[in-house]
Image (tube, rainbow, N blue to C red):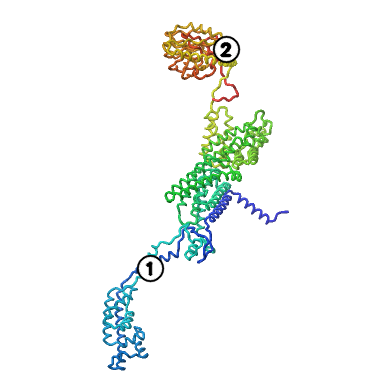
Amino acid sequence: MMPSRRQKTTARKHRSLREFFAIPATRTTIVLLVGAVILCVLMTVAIAPKRYNLRVGEISYTTITATKDVVDEVSTARQREEAASKVEPSYVFNESVTTEVLQNLEAVLGQVNSVQQYGRTILEQQHPGDPQAQQAYQFNEAELNYAKGQLTQLTLAGYQMQTLLHATNQQMLDMSEDLTAAVENIMNTTIREGYTSETIQYLQQIVGYKTEIDLLQNVVTPILRKVMQPNMLIDKTATEALREEARKTVEPVIYKQGQNIVLARERVTYNQLEMLRSLGLLDNDNVDIMMYVSAIAMVLVAIGILLLVLHLFCPEVLRQPYRMLIIMLALCITLGISVLAKLINVYLMPTLLCVMMLTSLLGPKEGMAACLSMTVIVGTLATGSESTFSAQTVNIILTTLIGGMAALMIVRHKPNRQQILLCGIITAVVNAALILVVGFMTNTSLHDVAADAIWSGAAAAGAAILTIALDPLVEAMFNLASPSKLMELSNPNHPLLRRLLIEASGTYHHSIIVANLAEAAAESVHANQLLARAGAYFHDIGKLKRPLYFKENQLGDNPHEHTNPYVSAAIVTAHTRDGLVLAQQYRLPAEIQSIITEHHGDTPVMYFYHKATQQAGDAAVDVADFRYDGHRPQTKEAAIIMLADTVEAAVRSMSNPTPQAIEEFIHKLVRGKLDDGQLNEAPLTLLDVERICQAFATVLKGVFHERIEYPSISPAAAARVNAAAAASEENHNESRVEAAKLRRADTEEPAAAQPAAPAAAKPAAPAAQAAANAAAVGAAVAKPAAGAQPVGAVKPAAPVVQPVAAPAEKPAASAAQPAAPVAQPVAAPAEKPAAPVAQPAAAPAAAQPAAAPAEKPAAPVAQPAVSAEKPAAPAAQPAAASAEKPAAPIAQPAAAPAEKPAAPAAQPTAAPAEKPAAPVAQPAAPVAQPAAAPAPKAEQPDTEKIEAPQGEDHED
């Protein structure tokens, strides 16, 4: 059944979505968004305050403290109004008020006088000439109403009108004059607004001296209240400005963070409720949106810092979603644990956890980015819902930033568990020191500062413990190529490397050298050295499937000689796919799997391509059939291993690997990879490529250094060595006996003028007597100097063939000897030099007497002198010994020091005689070996041509 159009459209959409989400940038963006949301949620949860259901007058069963600094608005407003009310008003003088007051007074007095005249007329009509009857008369309602109608500018009550109507003309005249004068005088002064009543009272006192009391109270006072006005008016604008300034000077009533607002078992007041409402601590109340917006903004700033640092120092992380996922996971874990730890103590937050984790899992650059980002996050978390930047926040920021950098420097070199634990201890000390320094500047309580320092140190140590616990989980979850994992994979005991060593030893050793090359090159271009080494170890594990099809593992026939070149190319190119299968089977990190598939890129196997071309004749051969099917290197490490693999295999085939030839060959090989485009997708510059070439050259010059040619031993020389070894043991024992006798002689006769008599030495062979007789042929020698002591060896000297000539009072002339070992004796020193006498060679084990030391050493001869303090250069024959100064070293080895036995001696050391005999010529044995038989010619040594054995590696 054919799919419908809708099904095709749906499938096309699904395919487009899969392709979209397969883009690394898309997945990285999704990881960032999800991580940002999680961080924002954790932050808002951490700073969200607890809410309460309270009303005015209710009893609170919990002591409620301020989550941040809050202003008591009610108390503050009351105090500000009090301050404003205490401000004196600002006045403005109004000159027109005086004229207006006097005019009004004149008009009122005119109407009052008219009304008084009306009353006087009625009284005269009713009771003419009777003052008492007039005074007792009560005006009726009609009369009063008429009188009130005459007073349009003044309103008087009935009893006041009665007083005015009963007033006499003289009273009215006196009142008018006094009142007018008083008002005029007072208006020439200042009357402030608001002080009119005080002015009226003052005028009443002035006028009251001459005015009847009833008239004063009922007529004068209403007139004053009507006409009096202040001439100093309040300037409302200026006064309000002064009052506003006064309000501003009042500090707000603030409850600090942590201060109790409502105490348990107390009634809630209006002021307290308003403060709780402003803090957002009441149920069904508005949420403090700005607090949460600010927290989210700080989280976004932290993520921005993270991305900026990653872009500047390790931009490849932005193209690897799983690495970004690990970074965001570490940040979320750190923030989540910090939120819980803050409930106990704010200094217990393990802010260094993400730094330690990312440095040990990914590297120091990622750790540095996390350190800066976490500093912003925990700074916001420590501030929380506070409105002030407290010393506590400073402490948290400093410990996170400085402690994080210290952890970064400690963990980055050795990201193992021991180093992480050490990092926890060191950062704990650093954090505690920072808390103490800041605390002593801002806090006077030693107990509080010490407690904060202990909490901060515990947080750093806890971060290290959590890192040790979480790192293996993250590594296993993401199959991560962390530094510790790479160090673990670099262990030669890894199962794959053990298999490689046993089943494909040539490939194993090739991988070791490639690893050395890759690590040196990675260091030169600032790539991941651990990844380069581990990737080089495993890059050819695919050869385990068919090890004998690769040249380095072939000990006999080459199976490719009997195989079709197409098949051979398929077998060789398949080792990258086979290696990927093995890498997945052994759960190697993805980075190493990529190196396995990319270290050959899509290069062709030219050997089999040329072979196929030769076999095909004129037929065309497609080079694509001989190419590897892997991707070209995408990382620095993969590109480095590709070049190292090519260089190591090619340089090994050089016939004459001189330093200059190696360097030129490396550049040629690398240039070929560049020309083929294999490095086009790797993040390498031409300068990086040049540095890689130099690093390769440095390593390979050390691998292919020159070596000296070691000698081979002929059968005759081997026989002499064996004979000397057998004789040395016996000579060693006899020398020890001889030395003991000489020490006893030295003890018994310390001041003797002549040396002690020689002790009889057991001859090692019958030729010892013949050697003693031959010594008498030499020139006569003088007695040794007074006080001279015989020399006795504590242990046998170095292997010698010739005895040491006895020194005399005067040094003998040196006998001419060649530098090479010859069978010539050293002339015995005497008063006059004796000519050397050639003697037949003594038997190999013949014992020869040793001469006593003289005051001065013999003159330099062809053989080096024997020193009792310091051995000279190795020689085949020893010369005369000096008690004061050894002779200069020459081409022949000297005897070893007398205190320590050296190589086996061919001759035992004879005891010193009173008169030493002349030396007997002895043939020289190579490397201190005695001759098997007397040499036919004393002047020629018994040596053979030396050649190094073939097929062996010799050390320098």
Question: Is 412 placed above or below 50 here?
Answer: above
Which image quadrant is residue 173 in? bottom left
SS at mark 2? loop
Q: Is residue 12 left or right of residue 295?
A: right
| Residue positioned 38% across, 64% down in the render | 246
Which image quadrant is residue 833 in? top left
Indicate the amino acid at tag 2: Ala
Report the front residue among 928 and 885: 885
Question: Is 889 placed above or below 691 here?
Answer: above
Give the percent coordinates (x, y) of residue 328: 55, 49
Write down the residue under mark 2: 932
Q: Nearer the viewer, mark 2 or mark 1?
A: 1
Give the percent coordinates (x, y) of residue 222: 33, 81
Report the front residue among 358 and 538: 358
Report the front residue among 576 and 214: 214
Give the percent coordinates (x, y) of residue 322: 58, 47
Write down the residue under mark 1: 85
Give the quadrant of the N terminus: bottom right
Around disc 2, counting alpha carbons within 10 Å, would you say few (fewer than 14), some (14 to 19), or many (20 or more)? some
Question: Is 302 placed above or below 61 here?
Answer: above
Residue 337 visible, this orientation: yes
The disc, 2 or 1, on the residue closer to the chain's N-terminal end is 1
Q: How far apart are marks 2 and 1 (CA)?
A: 133 Å
Give the percent coordinates (x, y) of residue 736: 52, 16
Residue 680 visible, this orientation: no
Count up the numbered dots: 2
Around disc 1, counting alpha carbons within 10 Å, would you say few (fewer than 14), some (14 to 19), or many (20 or more)? few
Indicate the amino acid at tag 1: Ser
